[in-house]
Image (cartoon, helix red, strand yellow):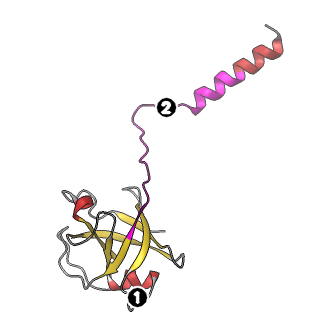
Amino acid sequence: MSPLTFFIFALALVCSAFASPINGTSTLEKRVTHTGRGTWFDVGLGACGKQNVNSDKIVAISSAIYGNGGNCEQYMHITNTANGKSAWGKVRDECPGCGANDIDMSPSLFQELGSLDEGVLKVSWHFENKAFTLP
């Protein structure tokens, strides 16, 4: 083996070691982007057990995703696919009447994406990492 070949092999080995996880405890959450209808509602006591007001940026998710409430207090990033406007909202409620990927938003959150007069928006959204806080 020539010295150049040996050097390249050794360098590749060192680089692969640094690219490997240090321990088996780090995990990545796969981001899944959902597309559905976005509507708004007058908020109150949500299924997550928190009292909300219309100025709070909150979201109610479908019963299919809500499950046992494991996404309560988790942020979502929501985009109006028609105009490109986006905003963050926090899961605080369940929407039993929503389709699987549909969401219901507080009026203040809905207004960041479109006009209340529109009533229904086509949105895409995804959950942020559980440790996410607003920028």
Q: Quadrant of residue 37?
A: bottom left
Measure the alpha-carbon separation of dots 2 and 1: 50 Å
Q: Quadrant of residue 50?
A: bottom left
The mark closer to the camera, 2 or 1, is 1
* Residue type pointed to by label 2: Ile
* Res. 133 in view: no
**Left or right: 19 in relation to 93:** right
Residue at the farthest top position: 1
Who's the residue at 44% across and 59% down the image? 33
* Residue type pointed to by label 1: Glu
- Residue that badge 2 annotates: 22
**Left or right: 107 in relation to 18:** left
* Res. 135 in view: yes
Who's the residue at 51% across and 77% down the image? 82
* Element carrying mark 1: loop
How many labels, in total? 2
- Vertical position of residue 19 compared to residue 60: above or below: above
* Element carrying mark 2: loop
**Left or right: 121 in relation to 43:** right
Question: Badge 1: how crowded within 10 Å, few (<14), some, or many (20+)?
Answer: few
- Vertical position of residue 117 compared to residue 92: above or below: below
**In front here: 55 or 127?**
127
Q: Quadrant of residue 90?
A: bottom left
Q: Which residues are magenta?
A: 11-36
Q: Quadrant of the N terminus?
A: top right
Who's the residue at 41% across and 47% down the image? 29
Mark linked to residue 118: 1
N-terminal label among 2 and 1: 2
- Vertical position of residue 1 compared to residue 40: above or below: above
- Asked whether 23 falls inside the magenta stretch, the response is yes
Return the x and y of residue 135 as percentages of the image width and height.
49, 68
Return the x and y of residue 24 as percentages of the image width and height.
41, 31
